Amino acid sequence: MKVGYMTNSFGLLIGSGAGVTSAKDIRYETICNDEDVIKTISSYGYSSIELFDGNLERFEKNREEFKGYLRKYEIDLLGVYVGANFIYEDSLEDELWRINLTAELAADFGAKHIVLGGGAVRAKGNTEQDYVLLGQGLDQAREIIEKHGLIASYHPHLGSMVETPEQIDKIFSLTSIPFCPDLAHLAAGGGNPLEIVKKYYERIHYIHLKDLKDSEFVPLGQGTLALDDIIQFLKSKDFNGEWLVEIDGFSGDPEEACKISYEFLEGKL
């Protein structure tokens, strides 16, 4: 079964300290031992991983160390997740510089996808022009990422300016970037994940599988989402993209979530 797992459930989420003062250094990072997490994910049968840009860039100066982990545990780097503001015109150049660095590293490590999440939320509320700026930024980021031979996708995310079905429709009318749906985020934002996946199927090359119960992200099969229906729809369309499990924010044991989710998918993919 070819399915990846996101490493971010195995530690505390932080942002890069340097990013407090420099837009070029804003990164997500999971506080964890990367090798231990890769070993655990591999042991449960997953074939690949996704990680945050901050975790990837730990290995910028020692690339062979990370490549050695991938070889040792017979696992691939599938994707890298990057956050983006994209509505502050003065900082866009530095944000795109950072994305170029991440894409170059990801390509060297054999990745296939860069997932962009975000769209900053202004204290006074976002304007219609902000959506135009986000769309333009995503298109520029896509061009940079594709120069490195990778697939760029946009991930609507809680806490960003693209949460609801209406906001998703708005941004996808303003950018040509592919869509990486996170099923639980779509549901938590008030949408029907199956209907959104059907609507934007032609844009999807990569999907984040996640379940939701009482506003908490939970292992696959332990929530209320119609995961089987979504998987069956994609398979009926001969979906040839990649599947990734992500159970961030789960209040239980991250290893248990990893194991349960793999077992849920056995025989389905």
Image (spheres, helix red, strand yellow):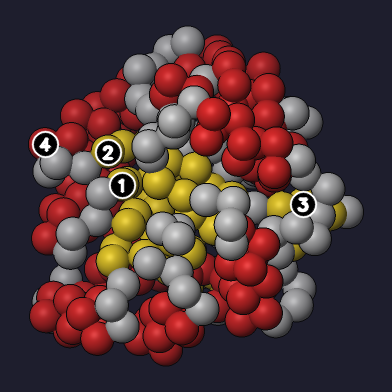
User: Label for residue 212?
Assistant: 3
Relative placement, left or right, of 62 versus 102 is left
How many marks the image carries: the answer is: 4
Q: Nearer the viewer, residue 188 or 268?
A: 268
SS of the residue at dot 1? strand
- For the residues labelled 1 and 2, the Cα–Cα distance comes to 5 Å
Q: Name the residue under label 4.
A: 147
Amino acid type of disc 2? Ile
* Displayed quadrant of residue 204: top left
Q: Horizontal and vertical percent for residue 231? A: 60, 40
Q: Tell me the residue at 12%/43% (across/down).
A: 148
The amino acid at mark 1 is His
Report whether 131 appears left or right of 79: right
Residue under pointer 1: 113
**What residue sits right under mark 2 in the picture?**
151
Q: Assign a secondary structure to mark 4.
A: helix
